[in-house]
Image (cartoon, rainbow, N blue to C red):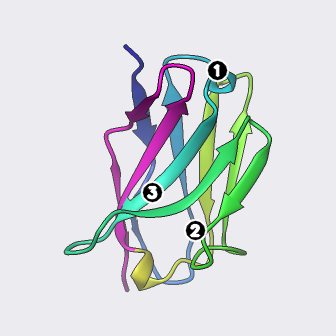
């Protein structure tokens, strides 16, 4: 069973930065897509961005230019660097990993990000 452990998050002022971490229990290169999602109170979960085949990144329009997805091969981790944070970025952020060979998607436990002055 694949486990995904997330870390990071917390409270930050508008304009600040945070970095979230995602650590799967299996090689990040064994997944087709590692993605980031978020869910704000009272709203549906929305896609933030993803890393495909360990190489290609994509971002939603709402975070493009402010958020960056990267990986650390040695640590087997994927990161979501969030800069120029806005109050509307406040949400629980989730990491997931898709394995298309077995048609499974694995989710992290989520981590809270609050952007407030």
The answer for how far apart the CA atoms under marks 1 and 3 are is 20 Å
Q: Secondary structure at mark 2?
A: loop
Q: Secondary structure at mark 1?
A: helix
Q: Is residue 113 magenta?
A: yes
Q: Position of residue 67 (x, y in %)?
A: 64, 66
- Label 3 CA crowd tier, 10 Å (few <14, some 14–19, many 20+): some
Residue at 61% x, 46% y is 79
- Label 2 CA crowd tier, 10 Å (few <14, some 14–19, many 20+): some
Indicate whether 8 appears above or below 44: above
The answer for how far apart the CA atoms under marks 2 and 3 are is 17 Å
- Label 1 CA crowd tier, 10 Å (few <14, some 14–19, many 20+): some
Earlier in the chain: of badge 2 and badge 3, it is 2
Residue at 29% x, 68% y is 44
Mark 2 or 3: in front is 3
Residue at 39% x, 22% y is 3
Residue at 56% x, 21% y is 101
28 on left or right of 21:
right
Q: Are marks 1 and 2 in contact (CB under 8 Å)?
A: no
Task: Give the residue pinned by disc 2.
Answer: 17
Q: Main secondary structure of the magenta part?
A: strand
Q: Is residue 98 magenta?
A: yes
Q: Quadrant of the N terminus?
A: top left
Earlier in the chain: of badge 1 and badge 3, it is 1
Q: Position of residue 114 (x, y in %)?
A: 35, 70
Q: Quadrant of the C terminus?
A: bottom left
Indicate whether 43 appears above or below 18: below
Give, as a single range, the part of the protein colored magenta: 90-117
Q: Which mark is residue 30?
A: 1
Mark 1 or 2: in front is 1
Q: Foreground residue, 22 or 10?
A: 22
């Amino acid at each position: 069973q694949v486990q995904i452990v997330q870390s990071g998050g917390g409270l930050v002022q508008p304009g600040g930065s945070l970095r979230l971490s995602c650590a799967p229990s299996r090689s990040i290169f064994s997944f087709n897509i590692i993605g980031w999602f978020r869910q704000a109170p009272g709203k549906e979960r929305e896609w933030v961005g993803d890393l495909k085949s360990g190489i290609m990144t994509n971002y939603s329009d709402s975070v493009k230019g402010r958020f960056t997805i990267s990986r650390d091969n040695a640590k087997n981790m994927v990161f979501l660097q969030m800069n120029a944070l806005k109050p509307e970025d406040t949400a629980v952020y989730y990491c997931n990993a898709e394995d298309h060979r077995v048609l499974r998607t694995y989710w992290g436990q989520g981590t809270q990000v609050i952007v407030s002055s």
